[in-house]
Image (cartoon, grey):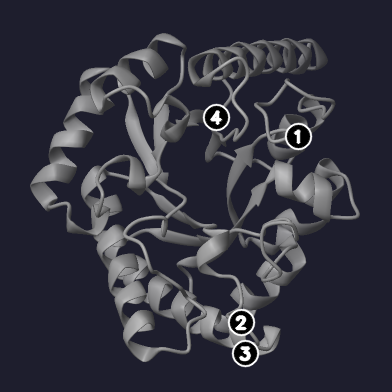
Amino acid sequence: MNPMRVALCNEVLADLDFGSQCAYAAALGYQGLELAPFTLADDPARLSEADARRLAAIAADHGLVISGLHWLLVAPKGLSITSEDPIQRAHTIDVIRRLIDLCAGLGGHYLVHGSPAQRRPQPAQDLERARELAIDCWRQAAEAAAAAGLVYCIEPLSREQTPLVNTLAEAIEIVEQQRLPALRTMLDTSSAAVTETLSIPELIDRHWGSGKIAHVQLNDRNRRGPGQGHDRFAPVLEALARHGYRGWIAVEPFDYRPDGRGCAAFSAGYLAGLREALALRAGAATR
C-alpha cells in the first residue's frame, strides 16, 4: 500500500459548508483536508479550542482527518511578516501562534507558510531587510510549533507572487541556519515548475536527503489541478516513493476547471489512477 496520503485543500470547495466539504472530499476518496483558515471564519485566530474540536469531529464523522493548515495570513486583514511597524509585526506573530494552537486542536500535523501578499517587502524596503524580518517571524513560529508538537514549513513561491524565498535551496538555507527542528520547508509543484531550473523529480533527488522537506502540494504550473495541464506527476510520485516519503500530499489548485467540485473530482481520479498504476508496476518489479 502506498504510504502517502492525499488531502484536498478545502478552499477548492469554499462554496460548501464545512460538513458538505468533508462529505464531498470523502466521497471522492481523499483521506484528509488541508485547511485555509480564512475559509473557517473572518478572524480564524479567534476560533476556540472547542471550535477546533467541533471541526475535527465533523471531519472524523466523514472518515477524514485535518492534515494541516496553509494560506495562513489572509485573514484578518493587515498582517505582514516584513512590516517595520512593531505593533503590526507583533499582531502578525500573535495570529500565527493562535493558528498553531488551532492546528494542534484540529489534530493537524503541519502549517504551510505561503501567504505571498503578507510577506512581500514593504515599499522602498530592501529585500535583505525584508528577509531578516521574515526569518525572525518564522523563528518565533517554529518555536511555538515545536511546543505544540507541529512542523512549520516555509513555502518557496514563484517570483510572480513574491521576491522573498523562491527556491527550495533558499528555504533550506534558512532552515539550516536557524537549526530549529520544527522549522522545515515544503515543495509546491506549481511554483517549483516555473521557478526552479531542475525538474521536480530532479529537485526531489537533489534536496530530499537534507531532511528539511516536510510536505508536498501538487498542482500544475498552469495553477490547475494535477493532470489538468502538461506537467507529468507520475515521475513526481515515483521520486517521492524512491526517497521513502510517508507524509501528506495535498491537492492545491488555484484555477478551478470546470469549477471547484469538478477540479477536486478530476484531481482525485487522476491521482488514484496514477497511484494504482505505480503500485502495479512496483508489484511487477518484485516478482
Give me the residue at 45% from left, 49% from top. Answer: 70
Q: Earlier in the sequence, mark 2 or mark 3?
A: 2
Q: Amino acid at mark 1?
A: Asn
Circle 1 SS class: loop
Q: Amino acid at mark 2?
A: Pro
Q: Report whether 85 appears left or right of 214.
A: left
Circle 2 SS class: loop
**Residue under circle 2?**
123
Quadrant housing the C terminus:
top right
Q: Quick one: label 3, few (<14), some, or many (20+) residues within 10 Å? A: some
Give me the residue at 31% from left, 14% from top. Answer: 23
Q: Amino acid at mark 4?
A: Pro
Residue depth check, mark 4 versus mark 2: number of the one nearer the observer: 2
Q: Earlier in the sequence, mark 1 or mark 3?
A: 3
Residue depth check, mark 2 versus mark 3: number of the one nearer the observer: 2
Contact (Cβ within 8 Å) of mark 1 with mark 3: no
Q: Quick one: label 2, few (<14), some, or many (20+) residues within 10 Å? A: few
Q: Is residue 221 above or below residue 280?
A: below
Across and down, in percent, residue 239 comes to: 77, 37
Q: Is residue 241 above or below residue 213?
A: above
Task: Find the distance from the CA under tag 4 to the CA under tag 2.
Answer: 45 Å
**Residue under circle 4?**
3
**Residue under circle 1?**
222
Q: Earlier in the sequence, mark 2 or mark 1?
A: 2
Q: Amino acid at mark 3?
A: Arg
Between residues 21 and 86, which one lies in front from this camera angle? 86
**Residue under circle 3?**
129
Quadrant housing the N terminus:
top right
Q: Earlier in the sequence, mark 4 or mark 3?
A: 4
Residue furthest to the left in view is: 50
Circle 3 SS class: helix
